[in-house]
Image (cartoon, rainbow, N blue to C red):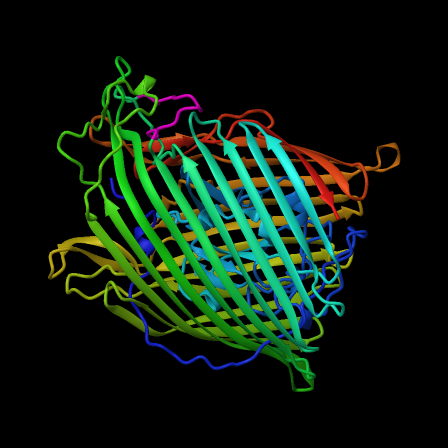
Amino acid sequence: MPLHRLQPGHRPAPLALAISLAIGALSAQAQALPDTQNPATLPTVNVISNQLGEVTEGSGSYTPGTIATATRMVLTPRETPQSISVVTRQKMDDFNLTSIDQVMEHTPGISIVTYDSERTEYYARGFAIQNFQYDGIPMMRDSAYSAGNTLSDMAIYDRVEVLKGATGLLTGSGTPGATINLIRKKPTRDFRGHASISAGSWSNYRTEVDVGGALNASGSVRARGVAAYQDKDSFMDRYSRKTATLYGIVEMDLTPRTLLTLGGDAQNNRPVNSTWGGIPLLNADGQFNDMPRSHNNGTRWSRWDQYTRTAFATLEHSFSNGWVAKAQFNHQINGYNANLGAAAAGFPNPADGSGVSLWRGQYIGRTTSNALDAYASGPFSLGGREHELVLGASVARRHWKNDGYWQLPADYVSTVNDYYHWNGDSRLPVWGASPDYVNSEVTKEQGLYTAARWNLAADLKLITGGRWSNYRNQVQGQRETGVFVPYVGAIYDLNGNYSVYASYTSIFSPQSKQNESGKALDPLRGNNAEVGVKAAFMDGRLNASAALFQLQQDNFGIETGGVTPGGATAYRAVDGVRTRGFEAEISGQITPAWQLQAGFSHAISRDQGKRVATLTPSNQFSLHTSYRLDGPLSGLTVGGGARWQDKTWGDISTPSGGTAVHTVKGYWLLDMMARYEFSKQLSATVNVRNLLDKKYYTIFSYYSTYTWGEPRSVNVSLNYKF
């Protein structure tokens, strides 16, 4: 079975003419991390000195100070006219969130569909999230061909920002659900670091070392290094994975106003006995195939090795008039070597376990991505008021190469004799000398963007902007040029704490589907209209928001029943999926000792009046909190969390050859944590996930399979700061 692209309708199609980059330049001295001895107060930061927003590490907070994901302008959450959720370094440390999957589980409004041991897909507002950024630089993520970036280790990141809705101003092409921005850790002027070890359920062992500080007496050259290694088994039989991560970054003050940053990271993921596609949902009698959670559908030779290599550079300069110029370059290689076999095809017979055969295939590939972004931002005066302007340009190139093998000798046995007692035994295939198919896909995108924040009155701000994009996919030989993506938002301050806002943003995604004349359909276009209220208390240490939103994707291709001149299936474009809903969130400090992040989201998606995106829940709730005790219990922090989602469903294949709707009931998951600080340097933390050991699963309706969620697990860690 070839690997399935999970969102074939969303794949970018051809486009683009190149446009020249013009904005040389480069910004500001990086900010030192906040004082760890005052966790209740967010650090005060000059926005010119950190164009990514404020560092959350050391703040002790579950809310950010400022962010820049939406427009490149450094704004507080209250000043940003879109919903945004941020998982800070403190929350990651409290709840032992070491992977991007775990961070997404703790992000309000995000749902996760698990396909197998190496692949997950994130959804927001009814749409799959394909837009990823690293320090604000867009990089494409392909969930079907998992290649390291889908298993990102959180040891190297300060925070993860999730901007809800369409984000085409900075990302260009993509889908309108959300953008995930991973912000890397930065060096500190003073020497500091930590070392930690942990052990948990299923022989889950991890160690981490993080050291940083000045490299010269003046502190003008600073560096930081992070190393993490994890070796873990699983609740699934036979499965294990080893993950090694390295990260290094150097900052150099070339002048008092000019900062050069150089860095890189590397991650290797080495799983053994990888699953592929999940467990068949139905037995041959049409009943649910209720296998134990420990069941592993992978063969003993199945594995999906993955790696990521990243190099990045940033040059920033701040001018005396308040303007900042910045250029960033990001080079990333994501590779995989997947030798896969899984007992997942067919319907097992309850009488004797017959009726199931192996999916098997080998996939070797890598994606090389290069992205360059340059912009200038600063104040200007007009009409007696000071406003802010951003002018920028970006260019990106992505080359994906993949060799696929699935043809085997005629004597290879793919059937499983007794599925219910199968232990993964299967002969290791000998693949052909040359691949059965080869992918080589080059995608290029260029864009010019601008945004302005108009200070119309003391209590009224208007943000306007737009992006002109060219996009090209050389496999299809098609191109789109001069695609305009608008951005507009308004924020009105009701008083010192509350603001109301409205915004409209959009995004586009080229497509290769053709009509009966052989002409490619216009790009898919997504937009996000949103109105809401935001609030900030205690000088921004507590943020809250509530929003009503509507997302729509137009030019959605549906089959006409005819064919193209080349004989392929023909499509026509119609207004596509529409999602309407609301969400609310609160995050930050309730009291100096009490941190909280909680959110509720409701979203229903329809296409031509029919419910779609039903594999993701319509309603979700999450709450995570921690409290630092004092008095006789001084040094003890306790916390917990709850996650709930309602039912999901999808069409699946049945043994009779038809289809049926399979429904997964809603469920609650509870977590808890406790930390004791023996001293300012040494602490121990206990984390329990899925406290009540709830059984739950997600379905992959395309292949009519399901994957069990993780049972209750316990983890104990020791951390030493220096």
Residue 327: image location, x then y, percent: 54, 74
Can I make out residue 3 in this image? no
**Most common secondary structure along the magenta stretch:** loop
Residue 197: image location, x then y, percent: 64, 37
What residue is rendered at 37% in x and 34% in y?
A: 275
Residue 545: image location, x then y, percent: 63, 54
Residue 361 is a magenta residue: no
Counting every numbered tag in the picture gives 0
Residue 436 vs residue 640, the one in the foreground: 436
Residue 663: image location, x then y, percent: 39, 31
Can I make out residue 43 in this image? yes
Q: Is residue 493 left or right of residue 4?
A: right
The region drawn magenta spans 287-300
Task: Specify the quadrant that holds the N terminus.
Answer: top left
What residue is rendered at 37% in x and 44% in y?
A: 611
**Outermost residue, top direction?**
351
Quadrant of residue 649 within the rendered picture: top left
